[in-house]
Amino acid sequence: MASKKAVSKGTKSRENNNDNDTKGGSTPRTESPTAKPSAAANGSSKKRKAQDTAGKEPSKASRKSNRGVPSEAVDPVKLINYLLSSDSLALCRPKDESADLEIRGKDTRAYSTSTFTPFEELLCAQILNRPISHTLGLRSIRTIFNDPHNLNTPRAIRTAGIVGCRQALEQARTQHRQKTAEELVFVADAVVDHLGEGEDDTCLERLREECSYDAEKEKEALKKYVKGMGKTGVDIFARRIQGTWKEWYPFADQRTLETMKHLGLAGSAQELKGIVDDCWKKIGLDSVDGEDDEEKKRKVFVLLLDRAVGCGLEGNVDEVKNAIM
């Protein structure tokens, strides 16, 4: 009897210590990479398959898979203009975000519609780097950047501290709140100590100058100084910041490129840049700001990547394609 009680007590303790809020969502669609099967498991699988097929006649024709086959041809101008339009937003962001903005108003700062400072983009990358769903990631961003929290500067983050950041994330009903709160403070500390010019700096110009505006050096510096920032986090940051930092353009991470390929638009960052250049005079620019055509092209590029990865994470690639047919 004593043994059974000890086991029950230990199980209950582990459940109480779990920081994940299961109310926030079930199986997440996340930007973080998923685990791959081990080489040993793959080797065992191949060995069993070889034994099972030994002595059997070869099949007359191998079955072809559609996986990796490029999407059917689409009109790039139609697709680009649709993705840039507000009509695509319902398919490229969580329903939770659309509903929230409907209630709180168009001035609410949101990842799908707002322009952020480099510091804010770094915070977003740190949040979206966590293994949480698209819905929870974007809800967390809306919560910390708007009233009553307004955690938009290193000073605001450091003043709130880990406790204040966690309270904001609790309001967002997200997961991994303690770890994410700690990492938000790590970002603020890194900007004050290494990447910026004090608690009110949101431009990260110190990082840029000390790395001589070299994108690769800047990426390495972010991984070095921002605790918890790895390749995935830097890729998320790069996808957005290239609209402002021209030295990072053109960039597209592999996951976004795969979605682009399924949409039938492009298979590489350079290819997508070329498509934007070729179609430029036919692209509607009502939602794009910029000092000149080069900046506007970068902003269009960023929007296309954002909408593509959004519709991919929401599982709406086919619906986007159907909308322009």
Image: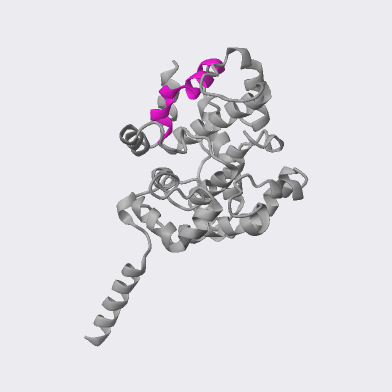
Which quadrant is home to the N terminus?
bottom left
In this rendering, the answer to whether 36 lies above or below 2 is above
Q: Viewed as shown, does residue 25 lie left or right of 51?
A: left
Of 269 and 73, nearer the camera is 269
Q: Viewed as shown, does residue 76 lie left or right of 277?
A: left
Task: Mark yes or no: residue 62 visible.
Answer: no
Q: Main secondary structure of the magenta part?
A: helix
Look at 47% across and 38% down and name the residue there. Answer: 111
In this rendering, the answer to whether 41 lies above or below 233 is below
Residues rendered magenta in the picture: 75-93
Counting from the top left corner in percent of width and height, residue 26 is at: 33, 50
Q: Is residue 268 magenta?
A: no
Look at 47% across and 50% down and name the residue there. Answer: 151
Counting from the top left corner in percent of width and height, residue 211 is at: 75, 48
Task: Mark yes or no: residue 113 visible.
Answer: yes
Counting from the top left corner in percent of width and height, residue 176 is at: 42, 58
In this rendering, the answer to whether 199 lies above or below 141 is below
